[in-house]
Image: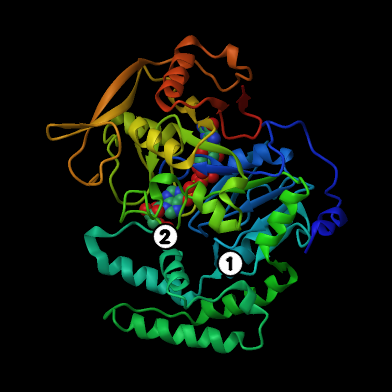
Amino acid sequence: MTFDFFLSCGLCKFGPPNLHNMEKNKIDVVLGLQWGDEGKGKVVDVLTPSYKVVARFQGGPNAGHSLKWGDDSFVLHTVPSGIFRENTISIIGNGVVVDPVILQEEISQIETKAGDITERLVIARRAHLILPTHRMLDAASEAAKGKSKIGSTLKGIGPAYMDKTGRNGLRFGDVLSPSFRDKYEALKKKHLDMLALYPGFEFDIAEYEQKWLAAVESLKRFKFVESEILVNNCLENGLPILAEGAQGSMLDIDFGTYPFVTSSNTMTAGACTGLGVAPSKIGKVFGIFKAYCTRVGSGPFPTELFDATGEQLRQVGREFGATTGRPRRCGWLDMVALRYAVMMNGVTDLIMMKSDVMNDFDTIKVATSYKVGDRVYDHLPYGLEEEVEPVYTEFPGWKSDICSVRRYEDFPEAFKNYVKFIEEQTGCPVRIISVGPDRSEVVVR
Ligand code: GDP
Ligand code: IMO
Ligand code: MG
């Protein structure tokens, strides 16, 4: 797979004007700065016309990335969020873990709207497969944790990454090997032995396994590629690439609220390992955050609200999981976590989402530090699970509907003050503001 492939796909013509100052031969990154669900899908969809290639670099079908255009909408789980923009190639990168059943179903649904995408989607040979037994292991392990369960999406993410780092995993490249079925059976046997260690956990994978094997066959119509070569070829040839993250920085396996995290590196560094690009090739880092905070699943959330304000955020913001439908926990913007995420990701441009959800608020609060006992922290302490009391700064609400605003100067002063405060606190410019779920509801500064 070379640059010719892109030329043959008619990808040499460029789309609408750039929303960013593209640095030639660099890859730009979009990622979430909070606990996931910041609006990455929408942002990637909005930015894609400025790119030729969009590549997912980690996570798997635990992600749910929502897009909306007019009366149409879609939730993507594995396929990159640029797929509905023509003249763009989508790559499922080596850092992603893929459930063939979920991917196959997703592709079928996409094709009812976008037509045949065989030539527009490629899959990394090095991407690992989520087996039916990975899902069972996820479920068994969560059930065994009882009260301290992580609140996993139960898509088999943890067990699949465990097999990857344990050097047992199966990859897309294996699918084409004559010994694939033997390798599959050997790994399944290992998993069944492990599942026997969970007494009382009952399961039946027969039906899912049939669907899984059929999905693997059907995905063979796509090109399985050395995506690291493809990505680096694109960079050498000056084709603009956007890397799409899943989850959020506070769910990062190393720097998130461990153990209540996912099993991959969700930060900029994950784009390097998840696609095979050198750190020096990273261009812009678009860090996405909601104007407040949400979290789904268990784990520390210092600014969580258990009152009517939290419920208002959930109802107005429609904060229900795009993958599992679970109600999301809601709270005020957490500047301690946001500053940490901006630092750890090397964010160059902030993108603020869902401020319209707070249109009716009299007062808006932002946590600027934490108190733990007598100590005040302005950075994330190691033991976030201890009793943490947020120290808040209060702002008057803008008390007006900002959904129809399309130019920054037209925002109310109270809103601009809120943005200015965030920029001062993070040392980073807020370049894009989203004021509704639709791809048109966006203000670019
Ligand atoms: P992702 O996982 O980061 O892609 O985010 P999700 O799709 O899981 O959740 C974001 C939700 O917010 C989706 O339902 C979006 O349609 C919606 N959304 C995105 N941006 C905005 C916005 O600016 N305002 C409002 N009201 N909704 C938004
Ligand atoms: P997107 O890409 C929000 C959370 C789960 C759970 C923890 C571990 O849509 O932002 P896992 O399934 O990885 O074992 O779950 O991480 N989680 C997410 N929360 N958005 C996501 O993805 C998430 N993916 C995983 O709720 O707490
Ligand atoms: Mg989501």
Taking the spot 87% from the left edge, 57% from the top edge, the residue there is: 8
In the image, residue 24 above or below residue 264? above
In the image, residue 92 above or below residue 70? below
**Any atom of ligand 2 within 8 Å of the CB at mark 1?**
no
| Disc marking residue 45 | none
Can you identify the residue that label 2 sits on? 263
Which image quarter is the N terminus in? bottom right
Residue 50 visible (yes or no): yes
Taking the spot 48% from the left edge, 10% from the top edge, the residue there is: 413
Can you identify the residue that label 1 sits on? 127
**Any atom of ligand 2 within 8 Å of the CB at mark 2?**
yes
Residue extending farthest to the top is 413
In the image, residue 358 above or below residue 37? above
Q: In this view, does 171 lie to the left or right of 142?
A: right
Q: In this view, does 375 lie to the left or right of 312?
A: left
Q: Position of residue 291 (x, y in %)?
A: 44, 29
In the image, residue 177 above or below residue 264? below
Taking the spot 66% from the left edge, 88% from the top edge, the residue there is: 178
| Distance Cα–Cα, label 1 vs label 2 | 15 Å
- SS for callout 1: loop
Quadrant of res 147: bottom left
Colouring: rainbow
Q: What amino acid is at disc 2? A: Ser
Residue 214 visible (yes or no): no
N-terminal of the pair, mark 1 or mark 2, is 1
Q: Position of residue 444 (x, y in %)?
A: 63, 25
Label 1 Cα crowd, 10 Å radius (few <14 / some 14-19 / many 20+): many
Residue extending farthest to the left is 374
Q: Position of residue 198 (x, y in %)?
A: 29, 78
Q: What amino acid is at disc 1? A: Ala
